[in-house]
């Protein structure tokens, strides 16, 4: 499916192309960057060049994220009904709720630990928090482009819950004598992007 789309062709061959030629070239470029970065990362890792491996793996992850965003946009664009779009939004929303529950779980575990084990669990929490932020960036374009009030309401609700969860996370960290600059940055990013829908008039 990816190969067909990167050539600007339809899946069946009988339909109109799902992406234009220029978009197809861009998609192909992202795919090639992902494959190249993954290969170079593996080679760097095996040769003991860990800093290089880190950089290549990061680039590969960014390429994969770009591909995910591209196909999500395509799914929304080609969905035949509001019900299909709503289903996609629900999938993303529940994945976001999963991340929220996971970093709350990690915080609860960290509270029972001390020293290095606590720091390790907080580091895991921050990783999950960043993953949740990445998922939010997939929901916000849908929110901006949709004219369906039902879909808009669903997205605003889950984003409002997400921001509230981060507020509580930052508050609990402070109350329990723990700190996370990452959590504060994500909360600041959410507020800067006006995602705190629960506090709007």
Image (tube, rainbow, N blue to C red):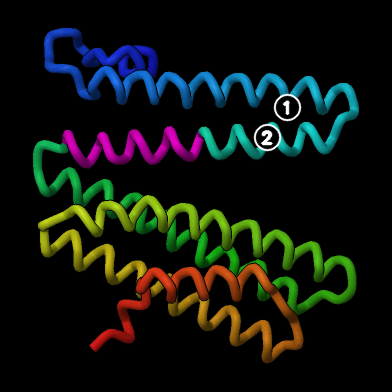
List the residue tagged with mark 1: 41
Tell me where residue 99 appears, x and y as whole percent.
51, 60
Mark 1 nearby-residue class (10 Å; few <14, some 14–19, many ≥20): many
Give the SS element for disc 2: helix
Using the rendered view, name the quadrant where residue 159 is placed: bottom left
Tell me where residue 72 appears, x and y as whole percent.
32, 40
Using the rendered view, name the quadrant where residue 128 is placed: bottom right
Using the rendered view, name the quadrant where residue 107 is placed: bottom right
Cα distance in 3D space between marks 1 and 2:
6 Å
Residue at point 58% right, 37% down? 61
In the image, residue 96 sits, relative to residue 112, either above or below, namely above
Disc marking residue 57: 2
In the image: residue 115, left or right of residue 99: right
Q: Is residue 73 magenta?
A: yes
**Of the pair 145 and 151, the residue shown nearer to us:** 145
Mark 2 nearby-residue class (10 Å; few <14, some 14–19, many ≥20): many
Q: Is residue 84 magenta?
A: no
Q: Residue furthest top?
A: 13
**Magenta-drawn stretch, dominant element (helix, strand or loop):** helix
Quarter of the C terminus within the rendering? bottom left
């Amino acid at each position: 499916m990816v190969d067909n789309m990167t050539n600007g062709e339809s899946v069946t061959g009988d339909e109109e192309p799902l992406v234009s030629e220029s978009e197809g070239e861009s998609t192909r470029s992202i795919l090639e960057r992902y494959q190249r970065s993954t290969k170079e990362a593996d080679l760097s890792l095996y040769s003991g060049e860990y800093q290089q491996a880190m950089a290549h793996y990061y680039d590969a992850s960014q390429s994969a994220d770009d591909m995910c965003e591209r196909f999500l946009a395509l799914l929304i664009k080609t969905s035949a009904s509001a019900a299909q779009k709503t289903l996609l939004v629900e999938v993303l929303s529940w994945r976001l709720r999963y991340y929220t529950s996971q970093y709350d779980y990690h915080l609860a575990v960290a509270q029972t630990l001390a020293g290095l084990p606590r720091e390790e669990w907080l580091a895991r929490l921050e990783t999950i928090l960043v993953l949740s932020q990445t998922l939010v960036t997939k929901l916000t374009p849908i929110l901006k482009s949709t004219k369906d009030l039902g879909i808009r309401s669903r997205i605003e609700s889950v984003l409002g819950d997400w921001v509230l969860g981060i507020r509580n996370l930052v508050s609990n960290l402070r109350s329990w004598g723990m700190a996370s600059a990452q959590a504060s940055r994500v909360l600041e990013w959410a507020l800067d992007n006006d995602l705190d829908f629960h506090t709007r008039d």
